[in-house]
Amino acid sequence: MQIFPHWTNRVPVVLLIGFFGVVGPSTTFLVWYYFSPEFTDVGYQPTQPIPYDHALHAGELAIDCRYCHAQVEVSAVASVPPSKVCMNCHSLVKRDSPQLAVLRDSVANNRPIRWVRIHNVPDYAYFDHSVHVRAGVGCVSCHGNIAEMVVVQQAEPLSMAWCLDCHRNPEPHLRPRDQVTNMTWQPGDDHAALAAAWRSELGLAPPESCSACHR
Amino acid sequence: MMHSTRRLMALAVMLMVFGGCMRGCTSPRPPIHPNPNMDLQPKYKAQAESAFFYDGMTMRQPVEHTVARGELERDPAIHEGRATDGTFLADIPMTVDAEVVARGAERYGIYCTPCHGAKGDGRGMLYERAQIESGDLVGDPRIANLPAGELFDVITNGKGLMQGYRYPVPLKDRWAITAYVRTLRQGGAP
């Protein structure tokens, strides 16, 4: 008497092929792509407590990034400006704007505005703005064209592969150091030669060793 | 019948793979990390929120009546632009060379141009947008002839409608801006 029908002979083969041919690769692909910050983090654009507009302030009004992100050249964090910095101007213009009620409240009560953080590398990786800015890497290389964003969004994955891509070949991202905050600066035809010269002049050596970014 | 089920299934799979939010589309929802690793550790980072301190900030204010190392402002000339008798210094109490002026020009461009304009005529972006005149650093003889110490004091502590720039601009840069503003009358040359 036969317990298993004839077709069950094929089951092991089908399972093997199915696993290694279909399930395995597709799982690998799904994890490789959908678990990476390229998918999870890029495009994060939270709603902020004040509809603060970079396209207006940094673009149209052409305020330099460092007017607000004042620590970016000297410290690891670029720092989001304290309310007082907004008040330098908003005690003069748009003093009664309803959009700025949160700002006035913050200054009156000496309480910080709860800006929602967008860019955030995992806590086991350590990033430092000052070295990059001093090396002549423009904000636009890592944040996209902020001066065109009405609401800031994350433009780059900030993944380890992304950091290393640049560390292995930084030249295309280098620019004169006085153009770091310029969102529209374009490299000229002689950029490759200039970049090589800047690199040796400043002695740039972007690290690839684990302990540089992981402590 | 059979045919349409298969088509539906194919459609569902395609939706899953291509329909999800890929690079290039934005979302206001916080990112989900399927594998959390140690991405978020119970430690304080700059400008973060604290559930422990009463004011909700991880970054602490200095305790009252204390001074951080290197922040003691003891020299009235360097820190206030005043002589020991309290009058403003006529000249900058540091050596001023082309490098200092160039630094001042760059810092002026960042912190002063929005209001005072690149030329220093008090008609920067703020005037164009809202017709608010900031002091004319070149054409107003009173302002143009301010002693260096008083100029430094305005930058540091503000005056009238203008707020002070002690916070974002460090001491040396404030003197560099002072040096640059004094060259504005000659068109920016030291």
Image (cartoon, coloured by chain):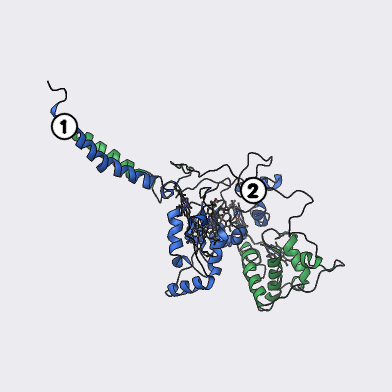
Chain colours: A blue, B green
The residue beneath circle 1 is A9
Measured from the top left, where is residue B54 in percent x and y?
Answer: 69, 39
Provide the chain ID for the residue under circle 1: A
Of the two numbered discs 2 and 1 on the same chain, state the one appearing first in sequence.
1
Is residue A138 or residue B181 the one in the foreground?
A: A138
Outermost residue toward the top? A1
Name above or below for residue B186 compared with residue B20: below
Say which residue appears at 45% left-offset and 61% top-offset: A166
Name above or below for residue B109 compared with residue B29: below
Say which residue appears at 73% left-offset and 62% top-offset: B156
Provide the chain ID for the residue under circle 2: A
Whether labels 2 and 1 belong to a single chain: the reply is: yes
Outermost residue toward the left? A1
Say which residue appears at 64% left-offset and 54% top-offset: A86
The residue beneath circle 2 is A103
Q: Quadrant of the N terminus of chain A?
A: top left
Measured from the top left, where is residue B90 in percent x and y?
Answer: 80, 73
Instruction: Examine the image and state in which quarter residue B72 appears.
Output: bottom right
The answer, for residue A156, to whether it is visible in the render is: no
